Image (spheres, rainbow, N blue to C red):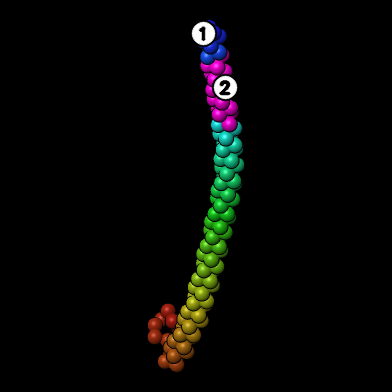
């Protein structure tokens, strides 16, 4: 009887060891499953974040290029306006100069030629 009791204890111990291994294996399988799901979620979120970053970068580039284009257009318009104003001032100045020269010649003609070169 002593022997059978000892054999029974050995059997129980072996069953407990197998059960412990089984529980341990199940635990690691569940843990790996959780890790995989977590990794998948992380990858999914990383993908979403990367897409959002790319979208934001493209929007920023578009905005920046639009601003540069608008700025260049404004500079060109200002340059054109300034050139037109400058030309208008030159024309007005030339008209005033012509009027002044005409008046001067008329006044000089009243008094007669002052030098020999003017007589010619």
Percent x, y for residue 98? 49, 82
Residue that protrudes farthest toward the top in the picture? 3
Tell whether position 16 is magenta: yes
Percent x, y for residue 104? 44, 86
> On the image, which quarter does residue 26 sit in?
top right
**Residue under the image location 49 percent in, 73 percent down:** 86
State the extent of the magenta-drawn residues as a range: 11-30
The chief SS type of the magenta part is: helix
**Residue under the image location 52 percent in, 16 percent down:** 13
Percent x, y for residue 58? 58, 51
Q: Gap in Å between the C-alphas at discs 2 and 1? A: 26 Å
Proximity of marks 2 and 1: CB atoms separated by less than 8 Å: no
Residue hosting label 2: 19
**Residue under the image location 52 percent in, 76 percent down:** 88
Query: Of residues 112 and 15, which is closer to you in this image?
Result: 15
> Does residue 22 sit above or below 68 in this rendering?
above
Residue that protrudes farthest toward the front in the picture? 1
Residue hosting label 1: 2
Query: Of residues 103 and 109, which is closer to you in this image?
Result: 103
């Amino acid at each position: 009887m002593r022997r059978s009791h000892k054999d029974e204890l050995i059997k129980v111990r072996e069953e407990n060891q197998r059960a412990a291994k089984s529980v341990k294996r199940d635990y690691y399988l569940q843990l790996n499953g959780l890790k995989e799901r977590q990794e998948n979620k992380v990858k999914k979120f990383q993908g979403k974040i990367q897409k959002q970053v790319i979208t934001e970068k493209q929007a920023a580039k578009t905005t920046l290029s639009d601003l540069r284009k608008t700025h260049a257009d404004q500079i060109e318009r200002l340059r054109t306006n300034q050139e037109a104003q400058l030309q208008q001032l030159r024309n007005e100045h030339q008209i005033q100069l012509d009027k002044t020269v005409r008046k001067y010649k008329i006044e000089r003609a009243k008094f007669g030629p002052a030098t020999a070169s003017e007589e010619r």
